[in-house]
Image (tube, rainbow, N blue to C red):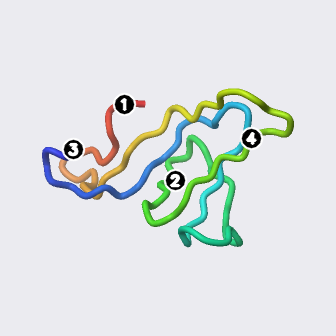
Amino acid sequence: SDPDGHVYAGVRFDASPTNGQLFYDPDGPGPAANAQIVSFGDGTVYAPAGVLTFVPNPNFAGNAFIRNFRVVDDGGVANGGSNVDPFG
């Protein structure tokens, strides 16, 4: 839970996943006609209403890692605040 009571606003990614690509469909579950490749390291926040889908590289078998993501809340950055978790 957020100690300041802020609401979850989404997630952002600071590095790309290994062995594949991550796609985001802003419309949520269903056909992925509007799916886009997730951008990394630019501060884009992907809203919780959408769906994230990992697509492995061809012929990949094993574990793929999605790391360096941060949870974002609606707290804003006014008065020295931070709306991104301190972990990465």
Disc 3 packing (10 Å; few <14; some 14–19; many ≥20): few
- Residue located beneath label 2 in the image: 44
Disc 1 packing (10 Å; few <14; some 14–19; many ≥20): few
Q: Secondary structure at mark 2?
A: loop
- Residue located beneath label 1 in the image: 87
Q: Nearer the viewer, mark 3 or mark 1?
A: 1
Looking at the rendered image, the quarter that the C terminus falls into is top left
Q: CA distance from mark 1 to mark 2?
A: 17 Å
Q: Check disc 4 and give the amino acid type.
A: Pro
- Residue located beneath label 4 in the image: 56
Q: CA distance from mark 4 to mark 3?
A: 39 Å
Q: Which comes before the other along the chain, label 1 or label 4?
A: 4
In contact (CB < 8 Å): disc 3 and disc 1: no
Where does the image place residue 39, in percent across and percent down from the top left?
Answer: 62, 49
Residue sticking out furthest to the left = 4
Checking the image for residue 80, the label placed there is 3
Q: Which comes before the other along the chain, label 4 or label 2?
A: 2
Q: Nearer the viewer, mark 1 or mark 4?
A: 4
Identify the residue at horizontal 72%, vertical 47% (top origin): 55
